[in-house]
Image (cartoon, rainbow, N blue to C red):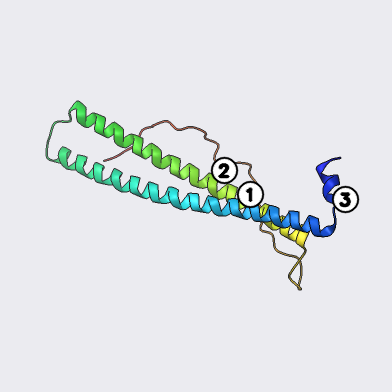
């Protein structure tokens, strides 16, 4: 017997409970993604502040006519890595937003289909889910040419 047969043979109250439980799980996952996004934003803000402070200090050293030593070259390479991390944040933000929209669309569909329309004027509104399977096609990052100064 398939899962669909089990659900179809259960009393309507059980199907409603299962649907409500599934909707709750989807909304909890969606809320977790939103919390993850806030944490990621905070961490990347700190990273960006550190990047700008370091770039400013390095710019001051260069402006004062100091020789660009191998050590300063290493510092610049470290700053390039910081920019790569900021690119990661951008990709992660897109993936989180896309997944969150997909989860909320599923939760709304479950609510509409299983729990019925609660709007006396018509059908419940379900925002359209993402059309693309993935907003970010890149799955790894390499440091590239980045203009710092």
Q: Nearer the viewer, mark 2 or mark 3?
A: 3
* Residue 79 % position (x, y): 30, 37
Q: What residue lies at 39% left-to-right and 37% top-to-bottom?
A: 84
> Would you say the residues marked 2 and 3 are in contact, meaning their CB atoms lie under 8 Å apart?
no
> Would you say the residues marked 2 and 1 are in contact, meaning their CB atoms lie under 8 Å apart?
yes
| Rendered image quadrant of residue 20 | bottom right
Q: What residue lies at 55% left-to-right and 36% top-to-bottom?
A: 137
Between discs 2 and 1, the one toward the N terminus: 1
Q: Which residue is mark 2?
A: 135
Quadrant of the drawing holding the C terminus: top left
Above or below residue 48? Residue 74 is above
The answer to which of 63 and 74 lies nearer the viewer is 74
- The Cα atoms of the two marked residues, 2 and 1, are separated by 9 Å
* Residue 100 % position (x, y): 58, 51
Q: Which residue is mark 3?
A: 9
Above or below residue 92? Residue 17 is below
Q: Which residue is mark 1?
A: 130
Between discs 2 and 3, the one toward the N terminus: 3
């Amino acid at each position: 017997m398939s899962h669909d047969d089990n659900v179809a043979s259960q009393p309507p109250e059980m199907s409603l409970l299962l649907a409500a439980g599934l909707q709750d799980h989807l909304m909890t996952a969606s809320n977790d993604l939103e919390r993850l996004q806030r944490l990621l934003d905070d961490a990347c803000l700190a990273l960006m502040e550190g990047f700008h402070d370091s770039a400013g200090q390095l710019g001051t050293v260069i402006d004062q006519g100091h020789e660009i030593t191998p050590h300063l070259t290493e510092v610049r390479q470290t700053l390039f890595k910081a920019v790569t991390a900021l690119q990661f944040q951008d990709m992660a933000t897109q993936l989180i937003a896309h997944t969150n929209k997909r989860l909320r669309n599923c939760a709304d569909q479950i609510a509409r289909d299983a729990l019925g329309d609660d709007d006396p004027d018509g059908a419940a509104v379900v925002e359209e889910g993402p059309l693309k399977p993935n907003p970010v096609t890149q799955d790894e990052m390499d440091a590239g040419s980045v203009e710092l100064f």
